[in-house]
Image (spheres, helix red, strand yellow):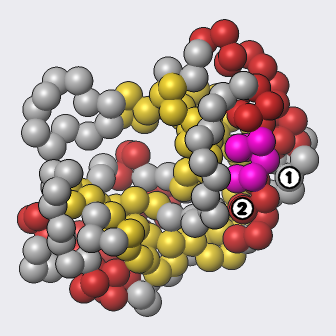
């Protein structure tokens, strides 16, 4: 199954961001983007890809230990940016160091379990809002990222590490979104 570790914002933060995205969707060029669904908004800590069923018990054990070693921390959605001309994202503020350490632990838990994590990249906390349509599409996302520059949600306390399953679209219907399902979660610091 296709899995990743994540921080899931509370519904209040999702609702605040949804109001901001509604404004973004009226900007010129917005129709050239594939906007992500609110129910899938999350901060990925570590992407695992396909994980064999027989590795799940150990992965759960190691993620529980990782969560136990980290204290709850404050977080808010703030600002935004882009990855080239492909991805528009909202950023994070608050407990970024604790979030990076949690991301490192979530990655280490998977590697120790035997999950092939591929190459290591510096962790950039982000919540994906939209992607350019099609693999060759290029959209100037500067105006969208600039519009997010002053955005800041209310702060909340991150209290859990979540393991999320990504169910990719299978119908072939254009614009269909992946479905995300929380498989398990563990409280931080317990």
The quadrant holding residue 179 is top left
Q: Residue 154 at x, y = what percent?
A: 56, 74
Badge 1: residue crowd in 10 Å (few <14, some 14–19, many ≥20)? many
Q: Residue 78 at x, y = what percent?
A: 51, 78
Q: Is residue 90 visible?
A: yes
Give the magenta range: 103-108
**Residue under the point 50% across and 72% down:** 91
Q: Which of 179 and 82 is in front in this view?
A: 82
Q: Residue 127 at x, y = what percent?
A: 46, 61
**Residue under the point 72% across and 62% down:** 100
Magenta residues, dominant SS class: helix
Is 39 on the left-hand or right-hand side of 2?
left
**Residue under the point 66% across and 28% down:** 115
C-alpha distance separating marks 2 and 1: 9 Å
The quadrant holding residue 182 is top right
Residue 160: assigned label: none
> Which quadrant is the C terminus positioned in?
top right
Whether residue 86 is in magenta: the answer is no
Q: Nearer the viewer, residue 82 or 68?
A: 82
Q: Is residue 161 above or below residue 59?
A: below
Q: Can residue 165 be seen in this view?
A: no
Is 69 on the left-hand or right-hand side of 136?
right
Q: Mark 2 points at which residue?
A: 99
**Residue under the point 78% across and 64% down:** 98
Q: In this view, does 184 lie above or below 31?
A: above
SS type, badge 1: loop
Q: Name the residue under label 1.
A: 70
Badge 2: residue crowd in 10 Å (few <14, some 14–19, many ≥20)? many
Evaluate if marks 2 and 1 touch, with contact meaning CB atoms under 8 Å apart. Answer: no
SS type, badge 2: helix
Q: In this view, does 154 lie above or below 35?
A: below
């Amino acid at each position: 199954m296709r899995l990743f570790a994540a921080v899931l914002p509370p519904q209040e933060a999702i609702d605040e961001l949804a109001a901001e995205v509604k404004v973004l969707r009226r900007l010129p060029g917005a129709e050239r983007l594939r906007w992500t669904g609110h129910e899938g908004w999350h901060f990925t800590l570590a992407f695992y890809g396909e994980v064999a069923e027989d590795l799940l018990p150990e992965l759960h054990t190691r993620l529980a230990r990782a969560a136990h070693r980290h204290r709850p921390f404050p977080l808010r959605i703030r600002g935004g940016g882009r990855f080239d001309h492909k991805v528009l994202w909202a950023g994070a503020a608050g407990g970024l160091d604790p979030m990076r350490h949690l991301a490192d632990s979530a990655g280490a838990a998977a590697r120790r379990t035997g999950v092939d994590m591929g190459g290591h990249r510096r962790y950039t906390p982000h919540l994906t809002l939209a992607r350019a349509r099609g693999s060759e599409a290029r959209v100037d996302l500067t105006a969208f990222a600039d519009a997010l520059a002053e955005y800041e949600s209310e702060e909340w306390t991150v209290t859990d590490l979540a393991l999320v399953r990504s169910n990719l679209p299978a119908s072939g219907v254009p614009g269909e979104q992946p479905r995300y399902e929380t498989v398990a979660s563990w409280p931080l610091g317990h």
